[in-house]
Amino acid sequence: MMNHVTRKCTKLLIAAMSVVSTATMLTLTAFADGGTTNSGSGGSATGNVWSDLLVSVLPLAIAILLMYLILFRPQKKREQEAQKMRENVRIGDEICTAGGLIGIVIRVAEDTVVMETGGERSKIRVKKWAIHENITQMEEKQAAEKERKAARQKGIVPAAEKKSDDKK
């Protein structure tokens, strides 16, 4: 599911790409008509060809850069975080698979995980790529964030934040 900001950015990117394609088509039409827009000037047409080429390529390059920054880079970051989460699964963690199964990890292998689920303690072996979320890690992060917020409200700066501030 895409959030509201991503939808707006996507719509903006589509509009920018349509403007770029229109500008490119106009420039290509100018090239087809002879490559010059200044009729009657005594100079060479080479300068006009390069400026026309720059005008047509620059917006396309900017659109590709924006597409990378808005769409591809955040997706790659999310994939790296998911991969890191899957690699950090430990015995005793509660996990949820992509299929919706929830269970507790009892064994971790190189590319598989054995989890125990249900009232009868059924054991299920799943691939690591099928792990959708690590509920235990999420709860630990939320608890740590609550502690940091409470400490900030009291005016206490945690030691980990002091070290990162010293490095800056």
Image (spheres, grey):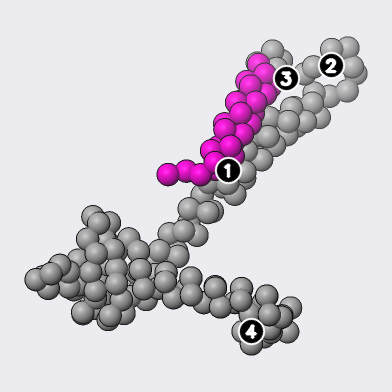
Mark number displayed over residue 158: 4
Indicate which disc, 2 or 4, sits on the residue closer to the N terminus. Answer: 2
On screen, residue 68 above or below 18: below
**Between tags 4 and 3, which lies in front?**
4
What is the C-alpha distance between the residues marked 2 and 4?
A: 67 Å
Mark 3 Cα within 10 Å, few/some/many (few <14, many 20+)? Answer: some
From the top left corner, tell me how far across and down residue 168 is, in percent: 74, 78
From the top left corner, tell me how far across and down residue 52 is, in percent: 74, 27
Mark number displayed over residue 35: 3
What is the C-alpha distance between the residues marked 2 and 3?
A: 9 Å
Label 3, secondary structure: give it: loop
> In screen coordinates, is 109 left or right of 24?
left
What is the C-alpha distance between the residues marked 1 and 2?
A: 44 Å
Residue with the mark numbered 1: 5
Q: Of residues 131 and 74, which is closer to you in this image?
A: 131
Q: Name which residue type carries label 4.
A: Pro
Q: Name which residue type carries label 2.
A: Asn
Q: Name which residue type carries label 1.
A: Val
Magenta span of residues:
1-29
Whether residue 84 is visible, yes or no, is: no
- Residue beneath the point at 63% across and 84% down: 158
From the top left corner, tell me how far across and down residue 12 is, in percent: 61, 34
Mark 4 Cα within 10 Å, few/some/many (few <14, many 20+)? Answer: few
> In screen coordinates, is 86 left or right of 116?
right
